[in-house]
Amino acid sequence: MQAVGADGQEMMVQEVLDWLQKTHGWTVTMLLRGHTVLYDSEADEEEQARQRAQRISENLEDAGELRQRELQLFYVCEGEDAEAGDARPPLLCSLP
């Protein structure tokens, strides 16, 4: 997917969650890049709000990862077991 928001900038985590819901009907409960958690519905409301408001590569840079043009994101949907892993194919996001 082209991870470009309506403002022409890199998508926010909330925009990716909305895109997955609108395009596939999936309610994502966890969004990850490798072991870095971008969104976790189990977090408290304040943390969830912070996560949803970040650009998808923002906390990757905070974790010391280099900026990349392509991100491979993994996700867990409502009703799935996070421990099962790799239940769905990764989402490849192209950044502006």
Image: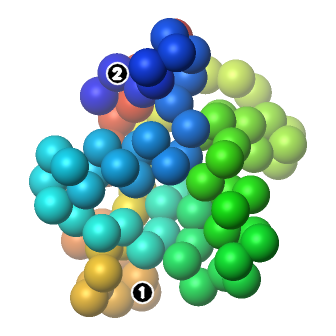
For image coordinates 75% across by 27% down, the residue present is 66
Q: Which residue is drawn at 58% across and 63% down?
A: 39
Amino acid type, label 2: Gln
Residue 13, x across and y down, in percent = 54, 46
Nearest to the observer: residue 79 or residue 46: 46
Please say which color scheme the image uses.
rainbow
Is residue 62 visible in the rendered structure shown here?
yes
- Give the residue displayed 79% in from the left and 36% down from the top: 61
Q: In this view, does 18 lie to the left or right of 43?
A: left
Amino acid at the residue labelled 1: Glu
On screen, 94 above or below 57? Answer: above
Q: Is residue 4 visible?
A: no
Q: In this view, does 82 lie to the left or right of 69?
A: left
Return the x and y of residue 35 as percentages of the image width and height: 62, 62
Q: Where is residue 90 in the image (x, y as percent from the top left)?
A: 31, 49
Query: Disc 2 on helix, strand or loop?
Result: loop
Residue at x 55% of width, y 23% of height: 10
Residue 80's place in the image compared with 9, above or below, is: below
Q: What element carries label 1?
A: helix
Q: Which of marks 1 and 2 is in front?
A: 2
Q: Name the residue under label 2.
A: 2
Q: Mark 1 points at which residue?
A: 83
Q: Position of residue 96 (x, y in %)?
A: 51, 11
Residue 26 horizontal side relative to residue 7, left or right: left
Q: How crowded is mark 1: few (under 14 residues within 10 Å), some or many (20 or more)?
A: few
Q: Quadrant of residue 85?
A: bottom left
